[in-house]
Amino acid sequence: MKNIAIFASGTGTNAENIIKYFSRRETGRVALVLSNNPDAYVLVRAARLNIPSITFNRKDFYEKGRVLNALRLYKIDFIVLAGFLWLIPEDILRSYQGRIVNIHPALLPSYGGKGMYGERVHRAVIEAGEKESGITIHYVDGIYDHGDIIFQARCSVLPGDTVDTLAERVHELEYRYYPEVIEKLLTGNEVNQSGQEELK
Ligand code: GAR
């Protein structure tokens, strides 16, 4: 049973979905939720689901090594970013090399990078007239939305789509695939690209 930590800055629907998924599995469990934002709704979700959480500021994270200490204290094996907006510092990247993943709500390498998160991503995709979007799950390195891609799944961008309707479609892909991909990585199983075949 591997211990998972989830980093999230916002509402935390993916975090909740992952917590619930692993509460029914023997492969891993979410042992800690971490946020840079003390007002993030993800903290309410974690409390409701009886998952311990901690918040931290920039100094704790980038200078004092307090977050790495907490990860060690909770014996965390694997780190999942779910709507987390800060870069991961060098000490954590080194200690968890190959064991930190992120999800991005578009098909990287397009529509990623600093400042590209949540609604902004979907707005950019719609404004560019793209016919498809999707999700990208990737390893995390020291650059925003940059590490090696593990898995992508696609969905259509429909005429008349708004940021909200596209976000909903992309969220469905996130809920469906992120927990399963995390589990495959935890258990050393190959992640295949079945989502790629869902092109509509
Ligand atoms: C998710 O759609 C995730 O892909 C995105 O933030 C949202 C968080 O939603 N992440 C990024 O944009 C990272 N660049 P949630 O808080 O409801 O899970």
Image: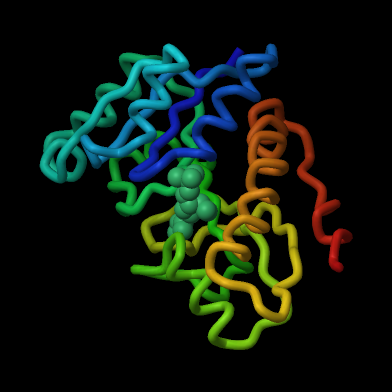
Q: Position of residue 164 (x, y in %)?
A: 55, 63
Compared across the picture, whether 81 is left or right of 185 comes to left
Q: Quadrant of the N terminus?
A: top right
141 w.r.t. 163: above or below: above
Compared across the picture, whether 183 is left or right of 138 comes to right
The structure residue drawn at horizontal position 70% and vertical position 73%, both measured from the top left corner, is: 157
Count of labels in the image:
0
The structure residue drawn at horizontal position 47% and vertical position 34%, both measured from the top left corner, is: 79
Compared across the picture, whether 94 is left or right of 2 comes to left
Q: Quadrant of the C terminus?
A: bottom right
Q: Looking at the image, which is closer to me, 85 or 158?
A: 158
The structure residue drawn at horizontal position 52% and vertical position 30%, both measured from the top left corner, is: 16
49 w.r.t. 147: above or below: above
Q: Position of residue 6 (x, y in %)?
A: 44, 32
Q: Looking at the image, which is closer to me, 194 or 9?
A: 9
The structure residue drawn at horizontal position 58% and vertical position 53%, both measured from the top left corner, is: 138
Quadrant for residue 161, please give it.
bottom right
